[in-house]
């Protein structure tokens, strides 16, 4: 198994021309802005892309990117299990933009989706508030809804995973267009 390396935003920016950049976020997130030259292979479709990613890694360095770095680390672990060397961007596209680096957007009209972490915060906060309001107005047992969300957030922090994000990623607004994996893999092969 190969161990993924981590690149800082400045090092990644300086090496953009020599990296194959794979963005593992949802198509909706990718459409809101991605690193220049990044190809969108959502995390849930990574297995199908393994042969082409192996070929890309043999031709040069592969950088895996997501919003914060958590999903890209998961992707790097999957790729490492298949002996595909990769690097991940420290802090993801969030760190990239906070350092003042530019994101690209697909050509044509796109809907602007909220970042997944913002969607998770809104959903978790709404569920906690709803549980508390219903506990006061309807029945105290509704406090369990708030407690369940709190427990989920603690589990998410401890495991560096997010079940709520996985569920939200499946919603239609996070998939304004389906990932055209065949087209993406053809572009990857052409590099």
Image (cartoon, helix red, strand yellow):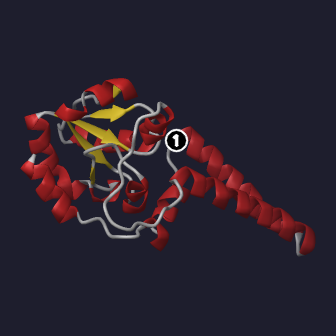
Please state if 191 lies on the left or on the right of 131 as rendered.
left
Please state if 92 lies on the left or on the right of 182 as rendered.
right
- Measuring 33% from the left and 66% from the top, which residue is drawn there? 108
Task: Residue 120: name its quadrant.
Answer: bottom right
- Measuring 45% from the left and 45% from the top, which residue is drawn there? 67
Q: Position of residue 189 (x, y in %)?
A: 9, 51
Q: Is residue 114 above or below residue 79?
A: below
User: Is residue 8 among the parts visible in the rendering?
Assistant: no
Q: Position of residue 17 (x, y in %)?
A: 20, 34
Q: Is residue 107 above or below residue 139?
A: above
107 or 151: nearer the eye?
107
- Measuring 17% from the left and 63% from the top, which residue is drawn there? 183
60 or 34: nearer the eye?
34
Q: Quadrant of the N terminus?
A: top left
Residues packed near mark 1 inside 10 Å, few (<14), some (14 to 19) or many (20 plus): few
Return the residue at label 1: 159
Q: Position of residue 50 (x, y in %)?
A: 17, 50
Please state if 26 lies on the left or on the right of 19 as rendered.
right
- Measuring 13% from the left and 33% from the top, which residue is drawn there? 60
Residue farthest toward the front in the current orientation of the protein:
108
14 or 162: nearer the eye?
14
Q: Quadrant of the C terminus?
A: top left
Q: In terms of secondary structure, where does tag 1 sit?
A: helix
Q: How many discs mark residues in the rendered view?
A: 1
Q: Position of residue 92 (x, y in %)?
A: 42, 38
Residue farthest toward the bottom in the current orientation of the protein:
138
User: Is residue 182 among the parts visible in the rendering?
Assistant: yes
Task: Residue 106: name its quadrant.
Answer: bottom left
């Amino acid at each position: 198994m190969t161990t993924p390396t981590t690149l800082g935003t400045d090092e990644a920016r300086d090496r953009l021309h020599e990296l194959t950049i794979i963005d593992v976020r949802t198509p909706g997130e990718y459409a809101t802005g991605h690193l220049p030259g990044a190809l969108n292979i959502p995390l849930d479709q990574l297995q199908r892309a393994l042969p082409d990613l192996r070929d890309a890694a043999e031709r040069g360095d592969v950088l895996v990117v997501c919003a914060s770095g958590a999903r890209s680390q998961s992707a790097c672990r999957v790729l490492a299990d298949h002996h595909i060397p990769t690097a991940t961007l420290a802090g993801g596209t969030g760190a990239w933009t906070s350092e003042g680096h530019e994101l690209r957007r697909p050509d044509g009209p796109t809907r602007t989706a909220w970042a997944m972490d913002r969607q998770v915060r809104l959903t978790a906060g709404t569920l906690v508030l709803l549980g508390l309001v219903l506990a006061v107005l309807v029945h105290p047992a509704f406090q369990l809804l708030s407690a369940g969300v709190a427990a989920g957030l603690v589990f998410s922090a401890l495991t560096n995973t997010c079940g709520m994000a996985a569920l939200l990623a499946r919603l239609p607004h996070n998939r304004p267009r389906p990932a055209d994996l065949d087209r993406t893999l053809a572009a990857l092969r052409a590099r």
